[in-house]
Amino acid sequence: MTHMSMTIPTDATAPVLVVGAGPVGVTAAAELVRHGVPVVLVEAEPEPKTDWRASTFHPPTLELLGELGIVDRMIAEGLVVPRFQHRDRDAGLVAEFDFGLLRDETAYPYRLQLNQQHLVRMLVERLRSAESTPLARLVFGARVLGVRETGDGVAVTVRTDDGETELHGSHLIGADGANSTVRQTLGIGFEGHTYPERFLIVSTSTDLREMIPGLADVNYVADPREWLFLLHTRESWRAVYPVPVDQPREVALDPATLQAQLQKIAPRADGYPIVDRQIYNVHQRVASTFRLGNVVIVGDAAHINSPVGGVGLNSGIHDAMDVVRRIVRIRAGADADAELTAFATVRRRVALDYVQADTHRNTERLKETDPARRQANQDELRAIVADPDRHRSWVRRASLLESVRRFGIARAPEPTDTSEPAGAA
Ligand SMILES: Cc1cc2nc3c(=O)[nH]c(=O)nc-3n(C[C@H](O)[C@H](O)[C@H](O)COP(=O)(O)OP(=O)(O)OC[C@H]3O[C@@H](n4cnc5c(N)ncnc54)[C@H](O)[C@@H]3O)c2cc1C
């Protein structure tokens, strides 16, 4: 479906262009509309994607989405999960962590397990109803091919079934995912590494808690060869595990292979009904900059990471909220360069120092092969949950609450020091 009009003004009422209607792009668009800023949301696909990908929303993300007024609906459709477990394939339960320790600090002291496409659906519905006002225009079935600065703003070339055209806006938010056209056409580097093993996600309608007594709704299971994590949503239980480097894709996805993997988690005489399966490459990459002029990149366009910990999408939503609130201030007269530089600096630092650092450490811990280090990891996790202060610090960091409280979302930039140096005449 294409909803397009080409008459978009380039003056002060120019819209903000958002490229990509994934969870990060729709959040940016909905937040712009909430602040009365016109937005044009451009998406390559004819309809929002519905594939099962990220499924965890952490406390500070729920706080931010709460300001959009959709959290009650998300909670009604999702699964509230205060506790998660670290396990070992041999040792069983190692330590159970409790987000409930954060209850004096946030209204949402838990992970909400909800597949990301539900957030997209809710916010696209909201944006479609705003299309009756001048604030929102949704342009689906339109692939962005290139981006250029125009002096007073930004222009993108888009291709639709009707041909190529150009859209204009004051700013552009590139939320077009890991293979971002916006990032690539601007020549922004995406340094990092790709894990040698691909990750496989297999989902079953069987309740794994019936098979494994004491299992939490979110579980990270260490093993030198076949580490995995087990996540529960209302639709399914999902197991995520590494695929051997030399195993062909079609073998990894073969129903017999999937059944064998699930049987190793917990034997089930009747086999497991499989409702979804996906295989994908996992990377740790961060863009060399999150901003060039009036163009910013957010979410997977700016940083991608291992899913162990469920923080990648969350930090993308934090990026979106941060930059939108700065654009709102810029439109009200704030220093554009200072605001966008602050966005790019702070959000890139969080991507490196929190998201990438923690998800890589989490992944390495799960796959540790050295028996002594594996034992040391278990001892450390047990010691952390036994100490209330360390336990609380751990869940503060794991939930991204620490990074959000430390750096804020859209905190005003430090004023430029224009004073004369001491001793100046
Ligand atoms: C198979 C899979 C499983 C995953 N599982 C997990 C998980 O368990 N936990 C976790 O935390 N994360 C997981 N992730 C990552 C998570 O899904 C992403 O972090 C999240 O989707 C990022 O959202 P986004 O909006 O930035 O990008 P995306 O969701 O990728 O959305 C980008 C949007 O931009 C559109 N687009 C792309 N190019 C253009 C263009 N040129 N013009 C217009 N539109 C364009 C795309 O069609 C898409 O709709 C998974 C990813 C994959 C691939």
Image (tube, rainbow, N blue to C red):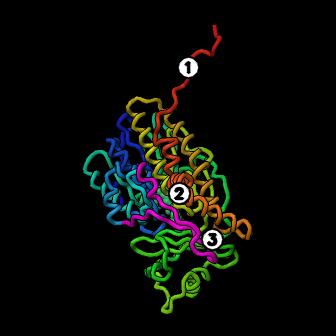
Horizontal placement of 197 versus 355: left or right? right
User: Which residue carries the number 2 mark?
Assistant: 312
Q: Which residue is mark 3?
A: 222
Residue plotted at (52% across, 62% down): 97
Which region of the structure is painted magenta?
Answer: 78-104
Give the residue type at disc 2.
Gly
User: Residue 42, image x and y in percent?
Assistant: 42, 53
Nearer to us in this view, 271 or 179:
271
Residue 378 % position (x, y) = 64, 66
Residue at (60% x, 56% y) in the render = 358
**Amino acid type, mark 3:** Ala
* 289 relative position to 125: left or right: right
Q: Assign the N terminus to one quadrant of the image.
A: bottom left
Provide the secondary structure element on which disc 3 rests: strand
Disc 2 within 8 angstroms of ligand 1 (CB): yes
- Displayed quadrant of residue 163: bottom left
Bin the neighbour count of mark 3 within 10 Å (Cα to Cα): few under 14, some 14-19, many 20 and up: many
Within-10-Å neighbours for mark 1: few <14, some 14–19, many 20+: few
Q: Is residue 418 above or below residue 271?
A: above
Crowding around mark 2 (Cα neighbors within 10 Å: few <14, some 14 to 19, many 20+) is: many
Instruction: Find disc 1 in the rendering and name its residue.
Output: 418
Residue in front for this viewpoint, 126 or 60: 60
Q: CA distance from mark 1 to mark 3?
A: 53 Å
Compare marks 1 and 2 and give the one earlier in the sequence: 2
Q: Quadrant of residue 91?
A: bottom right
Which residue is more in the foreground, 254 or 83? 83
